[in-house]
Image (cartoon, rainbow, N blue to C red):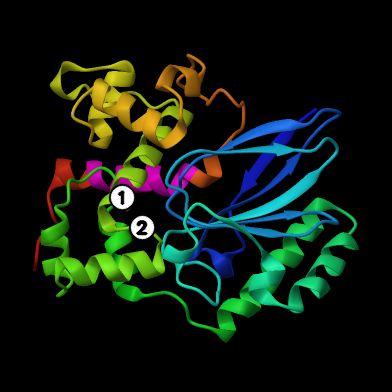
Amino acid sequence: MESYVERPPVPGLARVVRTVWIQRTGAEAYVQRHLPTGGVEIHFPIGGPPQLVGPLTGPEIEVIPAHTTIVGVRFQPGTAPPLPAVLDDLVDQRLGLADLWGGSVDRLVEAMAGAGTPERALVALQTHLLLEFRRAASVDPLVGEAVRALMPWHSVDIDSLATHLALSASQLRRRCLHAVGVGPKVLQRTLRFQGFLALAQAGAAASGRRGADGVAGLAVDVGYADQAHLSRECLRLTGLTPRQLLGGDLERCACGHDHSASYKPFLAARGRHARFVQDGPPRRS
């Protein structure tokens, strides 16, 4: 039977990794629909060649063979592991990790194959990533601030964001393309949809703004104009309607996977925004 389990990364990777996961297929091949998240991913089949999945702008369909175990790492936008290329060259691509990291991947493949369990293999992969990030500082602090500002729950104008960061709009776009793979507007749309999925996964109740509830209410809460706006974006990003994606159940996606670890940052940001709206900004003493 196919299974997928997410968990938070080790503390040393928390600022750059959104979640780590283990996926097992059963006696039959499994059709996996990968969705844009704003970040890159490492997919590491135990005993097989690992791949880096570049930033996605639409759905990618993968057929995972039967009796396969994959450990994976999903990075925050703008925090890819050290790579010999800028991310806008890797958009919507899968590349062999050996082509990007060289001989160190062979040693890592051997270490993970001999780890004994997928859980230990995931620890080995995260340990390797900790070393890689210590050797190369690859996080652009201005892009990191832009990513935080582009999270859902608060409307941000791209030109105003660029001004806040003391950049021109073209400079902000160029830095996002290099560090994230997509421009700030595309990233904003991707993160908004991820925010909607976070609410749906958590079974969150709509706030009731504009008198909307259910899917329509969640769409408004996360920043869509209305449910039709959400439906258009869902079709563009996933190839499915919201009903097809969620299987008619607002508490889980149709695939049956639990993505709670991946969506916690979105729910935490929503909580902070709700407190800000209710209480106002902190007062200066």
Quadrant of the image occupied by residue 149: bottom left
Return the residue at label 2.
Answer: 182
Residue sitting at 62 percent across and 74 percent down?
Answer: 130
Q: Amino acid at mark 1?
A: Val
Q: Secondary structure at mark 2?
A: loop
Residue sitting at 67 percent across and 58 percent down?
Answer: 51
49 to the left or right of 196: right
**Whether residue 252 can be seen here:** yes
Q: Position of residue 255 (x, y in %)?
A: 60, 27
The reply to whether dot 1 and dot 2 touch (C-beta < 8 Å) is yes
- Depth order, front residue of 150/272: 150
Q: Amino acid at mark 2?
A: Val
Magenta stretch, residue numbers? 263-274
Q: Quadrant of the C terminus?
A: bottom left
Q: Position of residue 95 (x, y in %)?
A: 63, 61
192 to the left or right of 209: right
